[in-house]
């Protein structure tokens, strides 16, 4: 059975944010033109994902969760966050919530971060510790899970 990959959760969360905005806006938190500030986390999130994806390609290791990695990437954005790709997707979603400006879309990045942490990050880190042992444990001491 194929496992659901992070982009599926990510795109589902975007749909959730938009649906919540239109069906249950509750309150306008951010008014125009301040909503345009959402472009900053959105752009940062896109950049994080593009740059870190290239790091995986340069090291010729898998980007897919639950596949065995043959390299531990600890430089670049991975020197600041152990999970910059997940962080990037959450930032994109936060940017979308800001652009929408109502209360309920902000639930989507929170839900996505929790799902990523429980469904992907915890098992991935367990697997990386099995593969890379002390090297990964030292990396975990130096670099935080998110930021």
Image: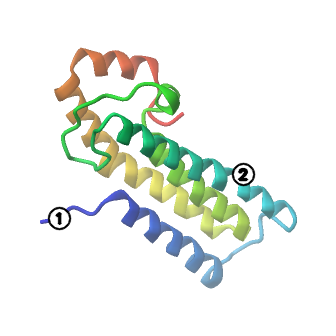
Q: Residue 2 carries which label?
A: 1
Q: Residue 40 carries which label?
A: 2
Above-or-below relation of 44 to 92: above
Query: Nearest the camera: 117 or 84?
Result: 84
Neighbourhood count class around disc 1 (C-alpha, 10 Å): few under 14, some 14–19, many 20 upward: few
Q: Position of residue 63 (x, y in %)?
A: 32, 46
Image-quadrant location for residue 1: bottom left
Q: Position of residue 15 (x, y in %)?
A: 51, 75
Neighbourhood count class around disc 2 (C-alpha, 10 Å): few under 14, some 14–19, many 20 upward: some
Above-or-below relation of 41 to 76: below
- At x 47%, y 58%, the residue is 111
- At x 74%, y 67%, the residue is 101
Position of 14 compared to 70: left or right? right
Q: What element carries label 2?
A: helix
Q: How far apart, in angstroms, are the residues tagged by discs 2 and 1?
A: 34 Å
Query: Nearest the camera: 78 or 94?
Result: 78
Above-or-below relation of 131 to 96: above
């Amino acid at each position: 059975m194929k496992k659901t990959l992070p982009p599926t959760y990510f795109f589902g969360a975007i749909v959730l944010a938009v649906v919540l905005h239109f069906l249950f806006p509750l309150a306008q938190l951010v008014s125009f033109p301040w909503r345009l500030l959402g472009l900053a986390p959105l752009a940062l999130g896109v950049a994080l994902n593009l740059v870190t994806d290239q790091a995986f390609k340069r090291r010729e290791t898998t980007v897919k969760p639950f596949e065995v990695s043959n390299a531990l990437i600890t430089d670049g954005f991975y020197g600041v966050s152990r999970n910059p790709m997940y962080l990037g997707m959450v930032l994109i979603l936060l940017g979308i919530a800001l652009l929408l400006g109502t209360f309920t879309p902000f639930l989507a990045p929170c839900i996505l971060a929790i799902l990523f942490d429980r469904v992907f990050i915890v098992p991935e880190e367990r697997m990386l510790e099995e593969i890379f042992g002390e090297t990964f444990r030292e990396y975990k001491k130096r670099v935080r899970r998110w930021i």
